Image (tube, rainbow, N blue to C red):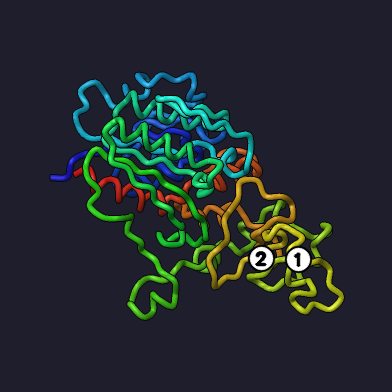
Amino acid sequence: MTQDIKAISLFSGAGGFDIGSHMADVPVVFSVDIEKDCVETLKLNDIFKDTKKVHGDLFQISSDEIKETLGKDYKDKFILIGGAPCQPFSKNGYWVTNKVRKGIDDPRAQLVNEYLRVLVDIKPDGFIFENVESLLHPTNKVIVDSFIEIAESEGFETKIVKANALDYGVPQKRKRLFIIGTKGMFKTEEPIKTHFPPEIAIKKNLKPFVNVGEVMSEYDTDEFFEEQELTDGGTYHEDLKEIPPGMNYKALTEWAGYPNPKFVADKRFWNFLLKLHPEQPSWTITAQPGPWVGPFHWTSRRLRVPEIAAIQTFPKDYVFYGSRRSIQKQIGNAVPPLMAKAMISFLKESLV
């Protein structure tokens, strides 16, 4: 008999992690986010009909209120999932090295502390904390070390998993860090990879990485047209049209042998005028791209909402609430559901 396992989700955003949890047969009973549009998105989707969805600041929400959603007589196992907003750890910034016993004394780590506060108070059977890989950078690593020290002092066995979404069927290069903890024992070294580089896949009869053309082609019709996708008349519209699929602005430089170069190689961000190739995975989908920051569609337009949602592996019928800008931010900040499913399945097998 399979034991019931439920999840409590912090910093839920548009629900990427939470969808992955449901995919792994671990229903989410509680979700919270400070962004109203994110919580409205959760409310619009039937998958979360039995989830308590809270719009609020985690600082103002007691651990007791969170745990109560399991019910007084709940005796089965449950896990805590979530990733504190990662912007502070994406850049080198102000740094304080002093740490305290039940938290991390760093101005950027306040939301990490809130996750730890809930973890220590509600005592789940396992947890997953997601963030950017640069959390392991020397300027940030004390946060990871302190996090693990606190989790292990609470009786968790922990593992750091550096993962790329490509390995789990997401048509996107997206590296993320997961800190996973269990009160049980890890049965395997790492989450099971389901997809592989094409050259390895063909030799061993495995599934190759998923390319964007496979998941986006159905949305390239007039039915899905968006006003915001047009680049006509923009500063770099003509340049964008000249760039071949799979390339960026460097295609128009002396480095690439372009006659009368328009740009100088390595003088721009690498995703400037970056264009997808239908037979390759996407680069990372971002939350707030600038007007000429890619990835762009191979037909020289900006991507449409259902396309970026498909690249992130949201279900086809998933509905988002808010303005176009808000929806881009929600999708770009999300953990791809297929990636989340792999991590939660890995944790789940350590609990049974």
Mark 1–mark 2 contact, CB under 8 Å? Answer: yes
- From the top left corner, tell me how far across and down residue 79 is, in percent: 31, 36
**Viewer-nearest residue: 203 or 265:** 265
In the rendered view of the protein, which quadrant contains the C terminus?
A: top left
Residue shown at the point (70%, 61%) measured from the top left: 301
For numbered disc 1, what is the local secondary structure? helix
Q: Is residue 125 above or below residue 343?
A: above
- From the top left corner, tell me how far across and down residue 35 is, in percent: 56, 31
The amino acid at mark 2 is: Lys
Q: Residue furthest front?
A: 98
Residue 240: assigned label: 1
Residue shown at the point (26%, 24%) measured from the top left: 71
| Earlier sequence position, callout 1 versus callout 2 | 1
Question: Relative to 293, is 132 on the left or the right?
Answer: left
For numbered disc 2, what is the local secondary structure? loop
- From the top left corner, tell me how far across and down residue 98 is, in percent: 51, 28
Q: Is residue 164 above or below residue 73?
A: below
- Can residue 163 be spotted in the picture? yes
Q: Quadrant of residue 200?
A: bottom left
- Can residue 317 be spotted in the picture? no
Question: Relative to 136, is 161 on the left or the right?
Answer: left
User: Mark 2 packing: few (<14 Cα in 10 Å), some, or many (20+)?
Assistant: many
**Viewer-nearest residue: 276 or 322:** 276
Question: Relative to 261, is 351 on the left or the right?
Answer: left
Residue shown at the point (78%, 71%) measured from the top left: 252
Q: Residue under circle 2? A: 275
Q: How many discs mark residues in the rendered view?
A: 2
Residue shown at the point (53%, 47%) measured from the top left: 137
- From the top left corner, tell me how far across and down residue 346 is, in percent: 30, 50
Question: Relative to 280, is 147 on the left or the right?
Answer: left
In the rendered view of the protein, which quadrant contains the N terminus?
A: top left
